[in-house]
């Protein structure tokens, strides 16, 4: 009987120890808004993105004009001329789509630039979080800005300001 009680006691002690893990929260949006380099990167990317969008809009306008002209001339066009103009319009639309993919696609220029600019900032943030976690004994750090399943979190476990202080902001 004493043996069983000892085993149950050890089991409860081990179980309770696993529940005693320390957790912390960060708010990545809050941290990023406090970093001046992040804001300047966003502004730069917005300017470049707008330039690319203007270029695409100009080409779309050209295709629209080509199509209007084609519609106006359709009664006077012969078979081969009609097909030629239709093919020109389709080719221009494909060119626009390729340009959109080149600039804004999943592996496009905007994605590559954002990734290249943001990686050093993200690495710094990650290293600061890791240092704080090791020194304070946190086993898990959760980003409350992206974790939609967090209904409530006590501000006491939010270490966002500590991360900013560690980064020097």
Image (cartoon, rainbow, N blue to C red):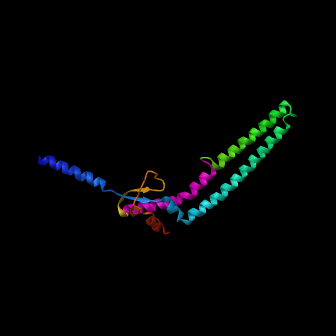
Question: Residue 166 at what x, y percent from top left?
Answer: 45, 67
Where residue 59 appears, x then y in whole percent?
75, 47
Residue reaching furthest front?
A: 151
The answer to whether 90 appears left or right of 113 in the picture is right
Is 76 magenta? The answer is no
Please tell me whether residue 148 is drawn above or below residue 132 in the rendered image: above
**Numbered marks: total:** 0
Is 75 on the left-hand or right-hand side of 138? right
For this orientation, the residue located farthest to the right is 76
Percent across and percent down for residue 100 are 67, 47
In-image side of 15 versus 85 (left or right) = left
* Residue at horizontal 74 percent and vertical 38 percent from the top: 90
Task: Report the predominant secondary structure element of the magenta stretch.
Answer: helix
Question: Residue at position x 46%, y 68% from top?
Answer: 165
Q: Where is residue 3 in the image (x, y as percent from the top left)?
A: 13, 47
The magenta region covers 107-134
Q: For this rendering, which residue is in front, 63 or 72?
A: 72
Residue drawn where x is 41% and y is 58% of the image:
153
In-image side of 12 versus 75 (left or right): left
Q: Which of 67 and 128 is in front in this view?
A: 67
Q: Spot the residue most to the top.
A: 79
109 falls in the magenta region: yes
> On the image, which quarter does residue 128 sit in?
bottom left
């Amino acid at each position: 009987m004493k043996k069983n009680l000892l085993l149950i006691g050890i089991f409860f002690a081990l179980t309770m120890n696993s529940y005693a893990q320390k957790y912390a929260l960060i708010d990545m949006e809050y941290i990023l808004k406090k970093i001046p380099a992040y804001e300047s990167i966003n502004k730069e990317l917005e300017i470049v993105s707008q330039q690319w969008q203007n270029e695409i809009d100009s080409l779309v306008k050209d295709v629209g004009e080509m199509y209007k002209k084609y519609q106006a001339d359709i009664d006077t066009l012969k078979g081969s001329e009609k097909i030629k103009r239709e093919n020109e319009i389709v080719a221009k639309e494909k060119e626009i789509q390729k340009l959109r993919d080149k600039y804004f696609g999943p592996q496009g220029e905007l994605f590559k630039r954002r990734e290249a600019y943001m990686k050093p900032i993200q690495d710094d943030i990650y290293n600061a979080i890791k240092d704080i976690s090791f020194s304070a004994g946190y086993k898990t750090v959760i980003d409350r800005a992206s974790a939609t399943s967090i209904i409530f979190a006590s501000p006491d476990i939010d270490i966002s300001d500590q991360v900013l202080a560690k980064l020097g902001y």
